[in-house]
């Protein structure tokens, strides 16, 4: 990082302007723009995410207060709230979604060498789930949720290697989670971990035919017939390890082959869990351990909601909401990319906090983080975030 530049400018400079402009040109995003082109819009919203601004008014207020430094921040010009709001309402959200997808493809390979928390399992492990953001149905009549309430869902596929999101799909609250299985592009030999909302035997069988494995929580009303059983160690919490066939005609037609059923008693929470999988070679206890890793996506959602601006939405239209959420995800990925490039032992949370309060500092970012590391004696962290970060 060059000395003499503001910290925000140093971070913004790692964003590939050429790739961003390709996304803009794909949707003709800068057509007939005067005051605010797509890059300037991205830079201002990225500033709002990195510095934790509460809304467009806060973003414009802070940038207008530093008009003389905007050029050196990497922002062409300041605009008022209404201009930024209109850009969010009218600019095609797919520009920022495509750029977010580019960042996913850029960052994901950087963490492929990271070890997962699952010892002895070499497969890639992906966790699929969604998080719901409550909104006002009066202000956002497109965001229908349950029980006449407003809601926006962010469906996410998280790679357990580095906890990098590899797929994002933003919908209204009525969009059923299981439909997200139609949108993801599966990786052969990978393991996909899901809760019971993703039980759809036709889709699960399609995954099996694509040479991928799944571990999914079973519903309590599952009708089946056991065709084989394996020995288990009940002292470890296991209650059964069976090969089963489905009994309901429709389900049997959708999934005509055997499925593995593992029953496990969690003594800490005093609850019994039942898992279904098409992985027959893995130890039964490993199946339960794989499912426990699903908690990582809950931590990811909690991190996003606590450290980026997603709970307070900056616009009411579907277009504005999708732009905001994609730029929030892009902010996470940019910081994760910076972490890797600098080989920093700090977590994404720590780096985000440092960058947020140092945006108008001219300290080189690498020196800023090295000084922090020396003063705080931070131990190396393998994960991007952990429970202590939240």
Image (tube, helix red, strand yellow):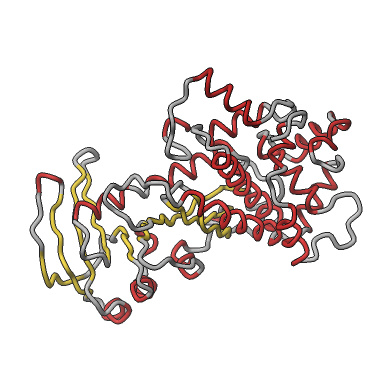
Residue 42 image position (x, y, % from top left): 74, 48
Task: State the residue in front, 82 or 366.
Answer: 366
- Outermost residue on the top side: it is 375
Task: State the residue in front, 380 or 203.
Answer: 380
Q: At 37% from the left edge and 71% from the top edge, which residue is drawn?
A: 207
- Outermost residue on the front side: it is 2
**271 in relation to 52, above or below:** below
Residue 146 in view of the camera: no
Q: At 78% from the left edge and 64% from the top edge, which residue is drawn?
A: 25
Task: State the residue in front, 171 or 50.
Answer: 50
Q: Quadrant of residue 5?
A: top right
Looking at the rendered structure, the number of numbered marks drawn on it comes to: 0
Residue 282 in view of the camera: yes
Residue 104 image position (x, y, % from top left): 57, 55
**384 in relation to 361, above or below:** below
Q: At 87% from the left edge and 32% from the top edge, which residue is drawn?
A: 67
390 vs 2, left or right, is left
Residue 340 image position (x, y, % from top left): 54, 42
Q: At 43% from the left edge and 27% from the top edge, which residue is drawn?
A: 379
Residue 6 image position (x, y, % from top left): 75, 31
155 vs 334, left or right, is left
79 vs 12, left or right, is right
Screen quadrant of the N terminus: top right
């Amino acid at each position: 990082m060059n000395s003499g530049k503001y910290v925000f400018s140093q971070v913004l400079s790692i964003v590939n302007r050429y790739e961003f402009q390709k996304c803009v040109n794909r949707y003709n995003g800068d057509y007939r723009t005067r005051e605010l082109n797509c890059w300037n819009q991205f830079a201002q919203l990225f500033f709002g995410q990195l510095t934790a601004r509460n809304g467009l008014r806060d973003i414009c207020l802070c940038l207008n207060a530093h008009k003389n430094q905007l050029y050196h921040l990497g922002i062409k010009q300041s605009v008022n709230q209404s201009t930024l709001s209109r850009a969010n309402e009218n600019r095609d959200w797919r520009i920022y979604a495509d750029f977010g997808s580019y960042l996913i493809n850029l960052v994901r390979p950087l963490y492929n060498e990271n070890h997962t928390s699952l010892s002895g399992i070499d497969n890639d492990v992906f966790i699929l789930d969604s998080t719901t953001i409550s909104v006002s149905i009066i202000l956002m009549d497109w965001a229908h949720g349950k029980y006449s309430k407003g809601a926006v869902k962010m469906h996410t596929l998280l790679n357990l290697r580095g906890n990098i999101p590899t797929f994002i799909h933003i919908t209204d609250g009525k969009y059923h989670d299981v439909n997200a299985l139609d949108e993801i592009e599966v990786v052969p030999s990978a393991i996909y971990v899901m809760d019971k909302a993703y039980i759809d035997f036709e889709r699960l069988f399609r995954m099996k035919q694509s040479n991928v494995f799944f571990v999914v929580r079973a519903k309590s009303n599952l009708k089946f017939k056991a065709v084989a059983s394996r020995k288990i160690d009940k002292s470890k919490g296991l209650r059964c390890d069976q090969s089963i066939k489905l009994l309901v005609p429709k389900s049997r037609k959708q999934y005509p082959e055997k499925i593995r059923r593992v029953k496990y008693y969690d003594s800490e929470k005093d609850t019994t869990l039942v898992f279904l999988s098409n992985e027959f070679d893995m130890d039964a206890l490993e199946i339960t351990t794989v499912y426990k890793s699903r908690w990582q996506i809950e931590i990811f959602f909690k991190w996003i909601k606590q450290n980026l601006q997603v709970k307070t939405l900056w616009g009411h239209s579907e277009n504005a909401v999708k732009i905001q959420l994609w730029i929030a995800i892009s902010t996470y990925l940019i910081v994760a990319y910076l972490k890797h490039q600098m080989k920093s032992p700090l977590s994404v949370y720590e780096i985000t906090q440092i960058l947020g309060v140092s945006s108008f500092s001219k300290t080189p970012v690498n020196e800023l983080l090295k000084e922090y590391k020396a003063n705080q004696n931070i131990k190396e962290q393998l994960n991007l975030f952990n429970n202590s970060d939240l």
